[in-house]
Image (spheres, rainbow, N blue to C red):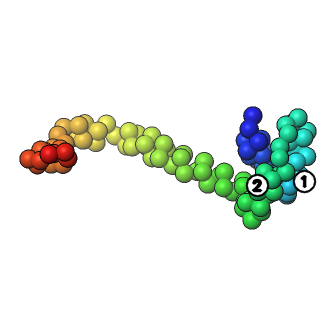
Amino acid sequence: MSSELAIVYASLILADAEVAITPENLSAVTKAAGIEVEAIWTKVFAQALANTDVNGLLSKIGAGSAAPAGAAAAAPAAGSAAPAAAEAEPEPESEEDDDMGFGLFD
């Protein structure tokens, strides 16, 4: 396991336990896991996450990916007539694919 990955996991553990993410706490978690990490990584990650709500950040990421799935599931439940009408319309051809009479290397 790389040092960076170990520090990321340690940061997530500390955030989940609602413990301050400090170089000392990061070092303690990685030592308890039996992973040697250079002191610079604990300092860098502690400074980067000092004013960041890690749990809030993770919940925002999860909420963004769940919304489109819910909307897609609700659409078929509205009725079967709408999808049949959508399938009947052919999609117009795109003019971007037409040959303009010249090539990139002509």
Task: Determine contact: label 1, label 2, CB under 8 Å.
Answer: no
Amino acid type at circle 2 is Phe
Mark 1 is surrounded, within 10 Å at the Cα level, by few (under 14), some (14 to 19) or many (20 or more) other residues, namely few
Q: Front-most of 93 and 95?
A: 95
Q: Amino acid at mark 1?
A: Glu
Q: Is residue 74 above or below residue 54?
A: above
Q: What x and y, as percent, mark residue 67?
A: 51, 49
Please identify the residue farthest to the bottom as the structure is shown: 51
| Residue at 66% in and 51% down | 58
Q: Give the camera-side residue of 25 and 68.
A: 25
Q: Tell me the residue at 78%/51% (across/down).
A: 41
Mark 1 highlights which residue?
24
The secondary element bearing badge 2 is classed as helix
List x then y, in percent, for residue 33.
87, 36
Apparent side of residue 106 relative to residue 59 in the rendered image (left or right): left
Q: Quadrant of the C terminus?
A: top left
Q: CA distance from mark 1 to mark 2?
A: 11 Å
